[in-house]
Image: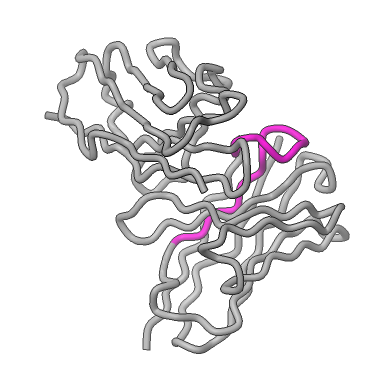
Amino acid sequence: EVQLVQSGAEVRKPGESLRISCKASGFSFTNYWIGWVRQMPGKGLEWMGLIHPDKSKTEYSPSFEGRVTFSADKSITTAYVQWSSLQTSDTATYYCARLSGDGYSWPFRFWGLGTLVTVSS
Amino acid sequence: EIVLTQSPGTLSLSPGERATLSCRASQSISSNSLAWYQQKPGQAPRLLFYGVSGRATGIPDRFSGSGSGTDFTLTISRLEPEDFAVYHCEHYGSSPHTFGQGTKVEIK
Protein backbone atom coordinates (compact mmCIF):
# COMPACT_ATOMS: atom_id res chain seq x y z
CA GLU A 1 0.00 0.00 0.00
CA VAL A 2 1.38 3.37 -1.03
CA GLN A 3 1.62 5.74 1.92
CA LEU A 4 2.88 9.28 2.31
CA VAL A 5 3.12 10.25 5.97
CA GLN A 6 3.71 13.93 6.59
CA SER A 7 5.17 15.58 9.65
CA GLY A 8 2.97 17.35 12.15
CA ALA A 9 1.67 20.89 12.32
CA GLU A 10 4.19 23.67 12.87
CA VAL A 11 3.99 27.17 14.29
CA ARG A 12 6.77 29.62 13.53
CA LYS A 13 7.48 33.33 13.66
CA PRO A 14 8.22 35.42 10.58
CA GLY A 15 11.86 35.15 9.58
CA GLU A 16 12.32 31.70 11.08
CA SER A 17 13.33 28.65 9.10
CA LEU A 18 11.42 25.41 8.75
CA ARG A 19 11.66 21.99 7.14
CA ILE A 20 8.69 19.65 6.85
CA SER A 21 8.85 16.05 5.76
CA CYS A 22 7.00 13.39 3.78
CA LYS A 23 7.87 9.76 4.56
CA ALA A 24 7.10 7.43 1.64
CA SER A 25 6.46 3.71 1.74
CA GLY A 26 4.84 0.98 -0.32
CA PHE A 27 6.59 1.80 -3.60
CA SER A 28 10.05 2.28 -5.05
CA PHE A 29 10.90 5.78 -3.80
CA THR A 30 13.59 6.33 -6.41
CA ASN A 31 11.28 5.65 -9.35
CA TYR A 32 8.72 8.41 -8.91
CA TRP A 33 8.58 12.18 -8.78
CA ILE A 34 7.26 13.56 -5.49
CA GLY A 35 5.45 16.88 -5.56
CA TRP A 36 4.43 19.60 -3.13
CA VAL A 37 1.14 21.47 -3.23
CA ARG A 38 0.14 24.50 -1.17
CA GLN A 39 -3.36 25.28 -0.02
CA MET A 40 -3.82 28.57 1.75
CA PRO A 41 -6.77 28.81 4.16
CA GLY A 42 -10.05 28.65 2.24
CA LYS A 43 -8.26 28.75 -1.12
CA GLY A 44 -7.46 26.46 -4.01
CA LEU A 45 -4.51 24.21 -4.72
CA GLU A 46 -1.17 25.63 -5.89
CA TRP A 47 1.44 23.45 -7.57
CA MET A 48 4.80 24.21 -5.97
CA GLY A 49 6.96 21.74 -7.85
CA LEU A 50 8.50 18.28 -7.98
CA ILE A 51 11.59 16.39 -6.92
CA HIS A 52 12.93 13.12 -8.31
CA PRO A 53 14.71 11.39 -5.42
CA ASP A 54 17.01 9.30 -7.61
CA LYS A 55 17.94 11.80 -10.31
CA SER A 56 18.20 14.63 -7.75
CA LYS A 57 16.25 16.71 -10.21
CA THR A 58 13.84 19.39 -9.19
CA GLU A 59 11.19 21.43 -10.95
CA TYR A 60 9.88 24.57 -9.29
CA SER A 61 6.87 26.66 -10.12
CA PRO A 62 8.03 30.21 -10.90
CA SER A 63 5.79 31.32 -8.02
CA PHE A 64 7.86 29.31 -5.55
CA GLU A 65 11.36 29.26 -7.07
CA GLY A 66 13.80 30.85 -4.65
CA ARG A 67 11.26 30.76 -1.83
CA VAL A 68 11.42 27.05 -1.01
CA THR A 69 13.92 24.23 -1.45
CA PHE A 70 13.04 20.60 -2.13
CA SER A 71 15.27 17.76 -1.03
CA ALA A 72 15.06 14.02 -0.55
CA ASP A 73 16.91 11.36 1.43
CA LYS A 74 16.82 8.04 -0.41
CA SER A 75 18.15 6.13 2.58
CA ILE A 76 15.02 6.90 4.60
CA THR A 77 12.62 7.42 1.65
CA THR A 78 11.71 10.89 2.81
CA ALA A 79 11.13 14.09 0.89
CA TYR A 80 11.38 17.56 2.37
CA VAL A 81 10.46 21.11 1.66
CA GLN A 82 12.21 23.89 3.53
CA TRP A 83 12.03 27.62 4.01
CA SER A 84 14.97 29.75 5.14
CA SER A 85 12.89 32.74 6.13
CA LEU A 86 9.16 32.30 6.59
CA GLN A 87 6.59 34.99 5.94
CA THR A 88 3.07 35.25 7.28
CA SER A 89 1.87 34.57 3.73
CA ASP A 90 3.39 31.08 3.98
CA THR A 91 0.60 30.10 6.35
CA ALA A 92 -1.06 27.17 4.61
CA THR A 93 -1.50 23.44 4.47
CA TYR A 94 1.23 21.76 2.47
CA TYR A 95 0.58 18.44 0.79
CA CYS A 96 3.11 16.04 -0.59
CA ALA A 97 1.89 13.77 -3.36
CA ARG A 98 3.27 11.15 -5.73
CA LEU A 99 2.74 11.21 -9.46
CA SER A 100 0.70 8.39 -11.01
CA GLY A 101 3.40 7.20 -13.34
CA ASP A 102 7.15 7.00 -13.36
CA GLY A 103 7.55 9.88 -15.78
CA TYR A 104 7.20 13.56 -15.31
CA SER A 105 3.88 14.33 -16.96
CA TRP A 106 1.41 12.59 -14.73
CA PRO A 107 -1.19 13.77 -12.22
CA PHE A 108 -0.94 13.16 -8.48
CA ARG A 109 -2.36 9.74 -7.61
CA PHE A 110 -1.32 9.43 -3.94
CA TRP A 111 -1.46 12.19 -1.37
CA GLY A 112 -0.29 12.77 2.16
CA LEU A 113 -2.72 14.17 4.71
CA GLY A 114 -1.06 17.56 4.72
CA THR A 115 1.03 19.60 7.14
CA LEU A 116 -0.44 22.82 8.50
CA VAL A 117 2.16 25.57 8.77
CA THR A 118 1.20 28.67 10.71
CA VAL A 119 3.46 31.72 10.60
CA SER A 120 2.53 34.40 13.07
CA SER A 121 4.28 36.91 15.26
CA GLU B 1 2.52 28.87 -17.81
CA ILE B 2 -0.95 27.56 -18.58
CA VAL B 3 -3.68 29.28 -16.57
CA LEU B 4 -6.77 27.23 -15.80
CA THR B 5 -10.06 29.00 -15.09
CA GLN B 6 -12.85 27.02 -13.49
CA SER B 7 -16.50 28.00 -13.56
CA PRO B 8 -18.73 28.49 -11.83
CA GLY B 9 -17.05 29.27 -8.53
CA THR B 10 -19.94 27.70 -6.65
CA LEU B 11 -22.68 25.40 -7.90
CA SER B 12 -25.77 25.04 -5.70
CA LEU B 13 -27.70 21.88 -6.53
CA SER B 14 -29.92 19.28 -4.92
CA PRO B 15 -29.16 15.57 -4.59
CA GLY B 16 -30.19 13.77 -7.76
CA GLU B 17 -29.48 16.75 -9.99
CA ARG B 18 -26.85 16.90 -12.72
CA ALA B 19 -23.67 18.92 -12.15
CA THR B 20 -21.61 20.38 -14.98
CA LEU B 21 -18.26 21.92 -14.10
CA SER B 22 -16.05 23.76 -16.56
CA CYS B 23 -12.26 24.14 -16.77
CA ARG B 24 -10.87 26.44 -19.45
CA ALA B 25 -7.16 26.65 -20.30
CA SER B 26 -5.30 29.74 -21.50
CA GLN B 27 -3.69 27.65 -24.24
CA SER B 28 -4.24 24.24 -25.74
CA ILE B 29 -3.30 21.39 -23.43
CA SER B 30 -1.06 18.83 -25.04
CA SER B 31 -1.63 15.09 -24.91
CA ASN B 32 -4.93 15.63 -23.11
CA SER B 33 -2.91 16.03 -19.91
CA LEU B 34 -5.82 17.30 -17.82
CA ALA B 35 -6.89 15.84 -14.49
CA TRP B 36 -9.76 16.37 -12.06
CA TYR B 37 -9.66 16.03 -8.28
CA GLN B 38 -12.31 15.99 -5.58
CA GLN B 39 -11.58 17.49 -2.18
CA LYS B 40 -13.78 17.29 0.90
CA PRO B 41 -13.32 19.53 3.95
CA GLY B 42 -10.29 18.57 6.01
CA GLN B 43 -9.16 15.96 3.50
CA ALA B 44 -6.49 15.70 0.87
CA PRO B 45 -7.58 15.85 -2.77
CA ARG B 46 -8.53 12.60 -4.51
CA LEU B 47 -7.77 11.94 -8.15
CA LEU B 48 -10.95 11.44 -10.21
CA PHE B 49 -9.78 11.61 -13.83
CA TYR B 50 -6.53 11.73 -15.76
CA GLY B 51 -6.02 12.19 -19.48
CA VAL B 52 -9.34 14.11 -19.54
CA SER B 53 -11.59 11.06 -19.31
CA GLY B 54 -9.57 8.24 -17.75
CA ARG B 55 -11.43 7.30 -14.58
CA ALA B 56 -9.18 6.68 -11.56
CA THR B 57 -9.58 3.55 -9.47
CA GLY B 58 -12.83 3.37 -7.56
CA ILE B 59 -14.50 6.39 -9.12
CA PRO B 60 -18.22 5.74 -9.77
CA ASP B 61 -19.48 5.94 -13.31
CA ARG B 62 -21.88 8.77 -12.49
CA PHE B 63 -18.73 10.89 -12.88
CA SER B 64 -17.45 11.60 -16.39
CA GLY B 65 -14.78 13.80 -17.89
CA SER B 66 -14.71 15.25 -21.39
CA GLY B 67 -13.22 17.96 -23.55
CA SER B 68 -10.16 18.77 -25.60
CA GLY B 69 -7.87 21.63 -26.51
CA THR B 70 -8.76 24.40 -24.07
CA ASP B 71 -12.23 23.43 -22.84
CA PHE B 72 -12.89 20.61 -20.41
CA THR B 73 -15.90 19.45 -18.45
CA LEU B 74 -16.52 17.32 -15.40
CA THR B 75 -20.06 15.98 -15.22
CA ILE B 76 -21.78 14.29 -12.31
CA SER B 77 -24.93 12.73 -13.73
CA ARG B 78 -26.90 12.43 -10.50
CA LEU B 79 -25.49 14.00 -7.36
CA GLU B 80 -25.19 11.78 -4.34
CA PRO B 81 -24.81 13.30 -0.83
CA GLU B 82 -21.11 12.35 -0.78
CA ASP B 83 -20.44 14.28 -4.00
CA PHE B 84 -20.82 17.69 -2.39
CA ALA B 85 -17.23 18.89 -2.33
CA VAL B 86 -14.72 21.11 -4.10
CA TYR B 87 -13.47 20.02 -7.52
CA HIS B 88 -10.11 21.06 -8.97
CA CYS B 89 -8.74 20.65 -12.47
CA GLU B 90 -5.01 20.36 -13.16
CA HIS B 91 -2.86 20.49 -16.27
CA TYR B 92 0.21 18.28 -16.01
CA GLY B 93 1.64 18.12 -19.52
CA SER B 94 4.42 20.65 -19.09
CA SER B 95 6.21 22.57 -16.39
CA PRO B 96 4.86 24.14 -14.35
CA HIS B 97 1.80 22.02 -13.77
CA THR B 98 -1.06 24.25 -12.69
CA PHE B 99 -4.40 23.97 -10.92
CA GLY B 100 -7.62 25.84 -11.48
CA GLN B 101 -9.05 27.78 -8.57
CA GLY B 102 -11.70 25.14 -7.83
CA THR B 103 -15.47 24.81 -8.04
CA LYS B 104 -17.48 24.17 -4.91
CA VAL B 105 -20.55 21.98 -5.34
CA GLU B 106 -22.85 22.73 -2.44
CA ILE B 107 -26.25 21.49 -1.36
CA LYS B 108 -29.05 23.80 -2.39
Q: Residue at x 47, y 41 (%)?
A: B45
Closer-to-camera residue (B10/A62): A62
Closer-to-camera residue (B93/A26): B93
Q: Residue at x 47, y 53 (%)?
A: A46
Left or right: B59 as drawn, with respect to B72: right
Q: How many marks?
A: 0
Q: Position of residue A23 (x, y in %)?
A: 70, 56
Quadrant of the rendering where the N terminus of chain A is positioned: top right
Q: Residue at x 32, y 26 (%)?
A: B83
Left or right: B61 as drawn, with respect to A58: left
Q: Which contiguous range is marked in magenta?
A: A93-108
Q: Residue at x 73, y 46 (%)?
A: A33
Residue B60 located within the stretch drawn in magenta: no
Q: Position of residue A59 (x, y in %)?
A: 68, 56
Quadrant of the rendering where the C terminus of chain A is positioned: bottom left
Left or right: A12 as drawn, with respect to A89: right
Q: Position of residue B4 (x, y in %)?
A: 41, 40
Q: Position of residue A82 (x, y in %)?
A: 63, 73
Closer-to-camera residue (A51/B59): A51
Above or below: residue A86 compared with residue B45: below
Q: Quadrant of residue B66?
A: top left
> Outermost residue toward the left?
B108
Q: Quadrant of residue A19?
A: bottom right
Left or right: A78 as drawn, with respect to A8: right
Q: How is the image coloured?
A: one colour
Above or below: residue A120 compared with residue A75: below
Residue A106 located within the stretch drawn in magenta: yes
Closer-to-camera residue (B30/B73): B30
Above or below: residue A55 compared with residue A106: below
